Image (cartoon, rainbow, N blue to C red):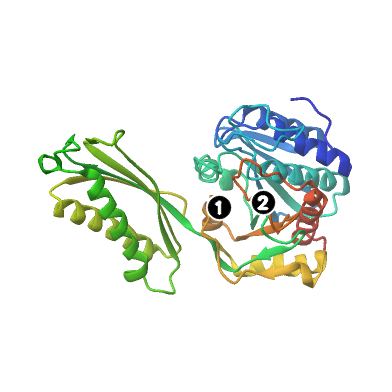
């Protein structure tokens, strides 16, 4: 990847679309990592590579203060076959920047260039370009490699574009803003046979259907109504022919929550219901329960800082406080568990019918690039203000 870094809006767009054409799945972002590192080096940043395998940190020091700030952008893509038909569509079949991480990376690189030229701050800036947000928890991998020991941060910040929010609107929230996510795979072990002789079988499809229906009672009847939680059975696999009862059925669940106590309660009830329902049909189950990302919890002072800055930057009418958190998940949660900070959304909506994130026809709105770029500049200069 060879390209001169942008210093104007057309160049920002060109860079974003260049990244969009060349997407890479988490922990294989080798060319993207090379590109980011090269651009930071040209700007005069101290560049460190290899944290979380493909992560990059660019450090810029100015003045005498030791006060520091970290800003995170994710740069991995998704295993999605793009259907946009755009001139700059993905050149990697089955891989697509369907979540806007190409835009996140471009905005932070754009801010990096302005900050390196202006140097209107006093302290230490760490720009964290993170891999594998979508799958392998790149934030935690970078931290396991000593991110905050090598690059101390008094606070950390990150944003995510949102095509469901009005263009240019900053959506902030103190406390929980995104959910914890877990996955559960339930396999029912039955006894297969001829579909015309069900009495001689133990039908795992019937048992699995019973488990699925019983799972719907957990949120409605076991979890307190004011504690948000979701159990979604996203896959149910069993059988291949109408006249054959299969040996087993498999369900895959996505579980979302915010409270650690509720998270534990959800797991306990899922296990109990699956085992109990299976036993009632004379069958056994295998349960593979995996804990994923923790809930993303924003810190009060840093969220106040973002809110106040956004109001000055964009105007009162362009800043909203989210009434409720989103049930999506985000591995920036791990960084916020170790350092004060805030995660927020930046609206990119063109029309109310824009394809959502993770959709094969999603297209990042390039008009937001200068807004996100300049907000990161303003945030850095405000947090590391000269005295």
Tell me the quadrant of the picture where the C terminus can be found.
bottom right
Q: Is residue 139 left or right of residue 255?
A: right
Image quadrant of residue 312?
bottom right
- The location of residue 8, given as percent across then percent down, is 89, 42
Image quadrant of residue 121?
bottom right
Q: Nearer the viewer, residue 96 or 386?
A: 96
Residue corresponding to mark 1: 335
Q: Is residue 36 visible?
A: no
Q: Nearer the viewer, residue 56 or 65?
A: 56
Residue 31 vertical position relative to residue 84 in the rendered view, above or below: above
> How many numbered discs, if any?
2
What is the CA distance from the residue labelled 1 to the residue labelled 2? 10 Å
Q: Nearer the viewer, residue 210 or 380?
A: 210
Which residue is the extreme one toward the left? 200
- The location of residue 263, given as percent across then percent down, is 38, 60
- The location of residue 63, given as percent across then percent down, is 81, 52
Q: Earlier in the sequence, mark 1 or mark 2?
A: 2
Alpha-carbon neighbours of circle 1 within 10 Å: few (<14), some, or many (≥20)?
Answer: many
- The location of residue 296, given as percent across then percent down, is 53, 58
Residue 362's label in the rendered image is none
Q: Is residue 49 left or right of residue 366?
A: left
Query: At 10% across and 40% down in the image, what residue appears?
Result: 200
Secondary structure under tag 1 reads: helix
Residue corresponding to mark 2: 70
């Amino acid at each position: 990847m060879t390209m001169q870094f942008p210093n104007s809006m057309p160049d920002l767009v060109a860079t974003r679309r260049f990244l969009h054409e060349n997407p890479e799945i988490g922990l294989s972002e080798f060319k993207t990592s090379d590109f980011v590192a090269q651009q930071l080096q040209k700007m005069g940043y101290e560049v460190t590579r290899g944290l979380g395998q493909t992560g990059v940190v660019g450090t810029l020091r100015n003045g005498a203060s030791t006060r520091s700030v970290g800003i995170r952008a994710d740069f991995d893509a998704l295993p999605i076959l793009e259907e946009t038909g755009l001139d700059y569509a993905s050149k990697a079949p089955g891989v697509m920047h369907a979540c806007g991480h190409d835009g996140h990376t471009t905005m932070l690189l754009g801010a990096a260039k302005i900050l390196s030229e202006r140097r209107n701050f006093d302290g230490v800036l760490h720009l964290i370009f993170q891999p594998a947000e979508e799958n392998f928890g790149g934030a935690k991998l970078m931290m396991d490699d000593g991110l905050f020991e090598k690059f101390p941060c008094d606070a950390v910040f990150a944003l995510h574009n949102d095509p469901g929010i009005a263009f240019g609107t900053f959506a902030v929230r103190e406390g929980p803003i995104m959910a914890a996510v877990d996955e559960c795979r339930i396999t029912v072990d039955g006894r297969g046979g001829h579909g015309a002789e069900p009495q001689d079988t133990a039908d795992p499809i019937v048992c699995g259907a019973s488990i699925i229906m019983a799972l719907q009672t957990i949120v409605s009847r076991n979890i307190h109504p004011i504690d948000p939680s979701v159990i979604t059975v996203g896959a149910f696999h069993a059988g291949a022919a109408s006249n054959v009862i299969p040996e087993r059925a498999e369900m895959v669940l996505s579980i979302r929550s915010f409270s650690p106590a509720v998270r534990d309660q959800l797991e306990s009830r899922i296990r109990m219901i699956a085992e109990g329902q299976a036993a009632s049909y004379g069958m056994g189950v295998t349960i593979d329960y995996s804990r994923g990302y923790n809930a993303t919890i924003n810190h009060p002072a840093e969220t106040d800082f973002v809110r106040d800055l956004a109001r000055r930057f964009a105007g009162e009418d362009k800043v909203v406080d989210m009434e409720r958190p989103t049930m999506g998940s985000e591995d920036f949660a791990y960084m916020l568990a170790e350092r004060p900070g805030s995660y927020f959304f930046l609206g990119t909506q063109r029309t109310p019918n824009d394809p959502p994130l993770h959709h094969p026809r999603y297209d990042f709105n390039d008009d937001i690039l200068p807004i996100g770029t300049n907000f990161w500049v303003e945030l850095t200069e405000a947090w590391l203000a000269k005295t």
